[in-house]
Amino acid sequence: MTTSEPPQHHVPLTDDRRLRLREMVSDELDAAWLYDELAGMSDDQPAEVFRQMAESERRHANHWTRLLHEDPGDVIHRPSLRVRLLALQARIFGLGFVISQLRREELVDIQKYVADPDSGDLAEEEREHRAALAELAPQVGAEGPIGEGHSGVGSAGASTFRAALFGLNDGVVSNLLLIAGVAGVAVGSDAVLVAGIAGWLAGAISMAAGEYISVRGQSEVLHRQIAMERDEVLLDPEEERRELVEIYRRKGLSPQLAQQVAAELADQPSAMIDTMVREELGLDPDDLGDPWRAAGSSFFAFSLGAIVPLLPFLIWHASDWTVSYWTLAAGVIASVVTLAVAGLFTSLVTSRSPLYTAARSVFVGVLAAAATFAIGSVLPFSL
């Protein structure tokens, strides 16, 4: 059965089934809208591929709509917040930034359709979409191994984006809690401003130093392991060849093929070293971490978040206004907005509902700030 033929029911059309089909229609139309948006951001050849994929997704939506005995032309669709965020992310950071995420989305569709008796050839068409995205990756600047989108985002740039989101969230929450706690003791005191500045700088420098030491130490350990593996390959090649044969046999290769592959690699020491590092140690020698980049990004992300609840106090102080609970309220509101935005974009990493992740971030941050303020209010100190 193809998507152009009238679909035949294999699953009874119960109320639950109708709800599920409507979700599939919405998902397909979301994908079509997103691919149309990406086409508008692309050059000629990638744009044509995205348009073809959008049209394919609309055919898929029509397939599920006809299973509902409804007219596809009567379907009114509004793009979900999730795909709007993906489009915004692509517009800001570039198409290559979202390719791995799109391939993951297609994989989810394949899993759904393989398990659905009414899907026809849709799973195979979604596989074609994944392949088309992989071919587009070099043209739109996708980073990293495009076939390895297991983390949900996959590329080095997206990993940095994820770390920046979490650093931003840490900065907002930790400094908001510090400011709220001191404000609970004496909101009008300069100590609140001093504490906020100290919390910002101490937190950012601490995060940067910790990241530098962590990544530097890990990198040194990994370089040492690679050096030891290199020595083993050069000084005891037969033992390493036997190890490689055993690795490939555990992966499912026949003894003869494992022996052949290992023998050919053993004739090329550099290739043998690279293969043993990847297969035996599970390391990518080209990606062992940059401690300075890790430190810099941690400092910047934490600082960006930490200054949000502090900003109203800086403005009030510069304007020579009287600092009061309204200043704290402004800091809380600014923090809530920032946490909500961070939560929305975090949903692209976690694949959870954008509204859920935003609400969770806000709830946890505000609850923690309220608890800290309450503790500060009952402390028997004055400033």
Image: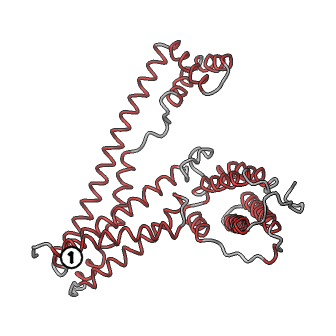
Instruction: Report helix, strand or loop for mark 1.
Output: helix
Q: Which residue is drawn at 52% across and 25% down?
A: 276
Q: Which residue is drawn at 76% across and 76% down?
A: 75
Type of amino acid under label 1: Ala
Which color mode does the image show? secondary structure
Instruction: Tell me: 254 left or right of 293.
Output: right
Q: Nearer the viewer, residue 292 or 333?
A: 333
- Residue drawn at (70%, 68%) of the image: 19
| Residue 362 locus on image (x, y percent) | 40, 71
Quadrant for residue 38, please give it: bottom right
Q: Where is residue 160 in the image (x, y as percent from the top left)?
A: 46, 54
Q: The N terminus is located in which quarter? A: bottom right
Query: Residue 73's quadrant in the figure?
Result: bottom right
Q: Which residue is drawn at 35% across and 51% down?
A: 295
Position in image of residue 156 (x %, y %)? 51, 49
Counting from the top left corner in percent of width and height, residue 371 is at 27, 71
The residue singled out by tag 1 in the image is: 183
Question: In this rendering, is residue 76 above or below 169?
Answer: below
